[in-house]
Image (spheres, coloured by chain):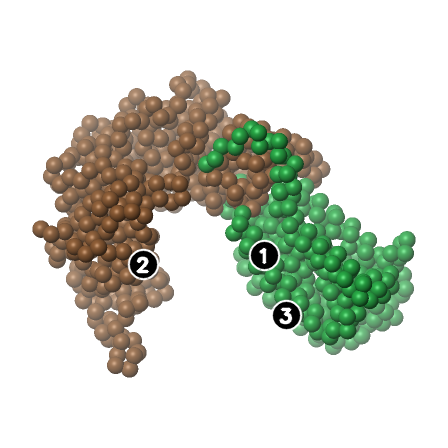
Amino acid sequence: MSNLLEVSGVSKSFGPVKVLKEISFDVRPGEVHALLGENGAGKSTLIKIVAGVINADEGEVRLEGKAVRFASPREAAAHGIATVYQELLLFPDLTVAENIYLGHAPKTRWGALDWNAMRAGARALLDSLDSPDLDVDTTVGKLSVANRQRVEIAKALSHDAKLVIMDEPTAALADADARRLMDVVKRLRDRGVGIIYVSHRLPEIFALADRVTVLRDGTYVGTKPIGEVTEGDLVSMMVGRAIDHLFPKVDTTPGETILEVKNLSYRNTVNDISLTVRAGEIVGIAGLIGAGRTELALTIFGITPATSGEILIDGKPVTISSPDDARRLKIAYVPEDRGSQGLIRPQTVRENVSLAILDRIARAFVVDRRQEGSLARQAIERFGIRTRGPEQRVKQLSGGNQQKVVLAKWIATEPRVLIMDEPTRGIDVGAKAEIHALMSRLAGQGLAVLMISSELPEVLGMSDRVLVMRGGRIVAQFDRKDATPDAVGAAMTAAKAGASLESAPLGFKGAAAL
Amino acid sequence: MTTETPALSRLVPVRRWKSFFESYGQEFVILAALVVLFVGVGFYNPRFISANNLTSMFVGNAYIAIAAIGMSMVIISGNIDVSVGSLIGVLGTISGTMAVNGYPVILCWLVPVLIGMVINAGVGVLVAYVKIPSIVVTLGMLSILKGGLISVTGGAWISGMPPEFMIAQFRLFGLPSSVYFMVVLTALAALWMKYSPFGRAIYAIGGNPEAARVTGIRIQPAIVGVFTIHGMFAGIAAILFATQLQVIQSTVPPNLELTVITASVVGGVSILGGTGTVIGSTLAAILFAAIGSSLVFLNISAYWLRAVQGLMILATVLADMARRRRI
């Protein structure tokens, strides 16, 4: 069978960071080709290159044997490549039909929009996707996420797509919807469309894919027909083996329980969570995107106050209804997105470091500049922040150094509980190791650390205990010694649709750790 | 990431200057423009820098600089107030009417300031707690105040205020009181914004509200606070405005709010919030006054002042964008 798409030797750098290194893979017509890898492995960059959003630095993309280089996603679409993005790019105030035909609507002889043709076309497309229940005249804003996804797919098909790229299409869907979506994907495949399917959910991949390609840290690990691999093989390919020596976690003897959470819930994103963190302990929370990990952190920290359940500090129940409350209780939160939640970018290092404790270092409405300055200089030294000095603006620092400023800000509050959400996302390897060393040292000084990370090696390397979340719940718990990549990976990815997927070979060692 | 060598630490003074200029770049540009203007126009026509002209320049414009202090704080917090001109008109009228009707002078000065604070505290509550964008709230306020004022007074002239009421005409060591008000209030506000936790919170909120909230800063009271303080400055500006001449026309000075906002923006306060200083806005207000006055001495139509102000806004914003890109 000739290949529909051939990618050979594609590399891409963003600044000094090489995010893709000589990737090659191909897609055949009528094939579902799964693309698998951890966050940051380069999947998104790769599909963006294929979809014409960005261009590769080196290498070649061939479509039906002809080399192509798209200047824009529109050009890629004209060549029959359609992309269904994770964050749906629909217009909520337009109707289903309008969304499907946006940008290439059928016209009448007079140049006006041909509404009849548009509605009929939309109807036919949706019917072919087994969605006769979807009304083409409702506005998209009124639809469920699952239905919007179907509209997005219909939109892709309206371009006569030969190749459809799907980026985690089931990430936001409930079980039944995920299954229906998978049926839609199978229909597309049977029509001869080639599909690149990005997903973290292994059972889904086993149920759908014909072949699977694994990426790790921007490099190509391998391509296998799905029949020749087990889940365990894929997890090993994804995470690799060189974990332990990278992480300087020092063994500590945990002290008293500092933070305890009992049956904590927030709406339907955090469900009945109970956990404890002891002094000197690092508790890692693993899980896929959308598993409710960040939501849990936001609830403990009072950004989205709990709708039910209890939080105890030192065994005493406390009320946390705002970040201000949390700060007074000596809880610190280093957020996932430093740009939008961690830093005041136009301000200086000094001003950012002191922001959380201004009341404390002010006397009679005046901030003590000497104390503030020495605080900033200490932070720079202690955290190894590479900066011109306390007066440099934080927006001029690199990502790793910005993260250290956020950390320094919170450590200045002398917290007892430190919640870190994706502490090393988007940071280069050297700075990563420094942040890990800092975390380890802080835990050694008796902080209770709760760490959320999507990078399995980080969770496994840094944590004394690992909790796994899925669907807003804690679904598994491992001690450091039992937390193998296979076991934790399985608990993370075990499909919530697992029961319905007979073909999914579940049940290797550790999967039943519940 | 580059590793800086320890040897670089010898360059500390240079770096301090760099940081200093990053913080006060716009202020220096305006100061330089002022010097050039005074020297240049002074050479052309020495009467421009005569004590008489400088005095009338300050007496006639100090109130704009003072209103711009509060405006700068509001803009730094990420908000805006387009109603300040109307507020000054209303408060000035209240003040003059009270004075004519024989109320104690102290009350004639204090009551309008308090009313300004109460009105703007209300604006702050609508912005912070009801979450209506400040431009909408203050547009509404603009019409309410302006319409109300014209309806009640019919635009009548107020005159016959007692001489002890005319605070803008007081002099100390030969300088008009307006100058003292402008300098002292600017200095106090600058220190307050730079060194008080409240001022820092305002910069943080304007720079990144989400991060400020996550850091435990209570945004809503701070926004109400900043509008209330702005109301106080508007009140003081109104008193100086009302007492600079022997008569007060009970209407809203045309385009006053735009002049005040322009002073803030040209003074280096980013319209996006989070950066700028009240020193800059005061310097910019002085610069406008000087340009307006110099047009007279250069025999150029005073109508050009507005066009010059417009050009300066564009130039400032372009310079700001260029600076952001470089940094």
- Chain with brown colouring: A
Q: Position of residue A1 (x, y in %)?
A: 9, 51
Instruction: Give amino acid for label 3.
Output: Ser
How many neighbours does mark 3 have within 10 angstroms: few (below 14), some (14-19), or many (20 or more)?
few
The number of discs equals: 3
SS under mark 3: helix
Mark-to-mark CA distance, 3 and 1 = 33 Å
Quickly name the residue at label 1. B319
Chain letter of mark 1 equals B
Question: Given this view, does label 3 or label 2 mark the residue nearer the observer?
Answer: 2
Question: Given this view, does label 3 or label 1 mark the residue nearer the observer?
Answer: 1
Quickly name the residue at label 2. A71
| Residue B312 visible, this orientation | yes
Chain letter of mark 3 equals B
Residue nearest the viewer, comparing B105 with A46: A46
Question: Which of the 4 image quarters holds residue A271?
Answer: top left
| Residue A514 visible, this orientation | no
Instruction: Give amino acid for label 2.
Output: Ala
Q: Are marks 2 and 1 in contact (CB under 8 Å)?
A: no
Quickly name the residue at label 3. B143
Q: Residue at x 16, y 56 (%)?
A: A64
As drawn, A286 above or below A443: below
As drawn, A134 above or below B247: above
Residue nearest the viewer, comparing B275 with B189: B275
Pointer 3 and pointer 2 on the same chain: no
Question: Which of the 4 image quarters holds residue B99?
Answer: bottom right
Instruction: Give amino acid for label 1.
Output: Ala
The first of marks 3 and 1 along the sequence is 3
SS under mark 1: helix
SS under mark 2: loop
- Chain with green colouring: B
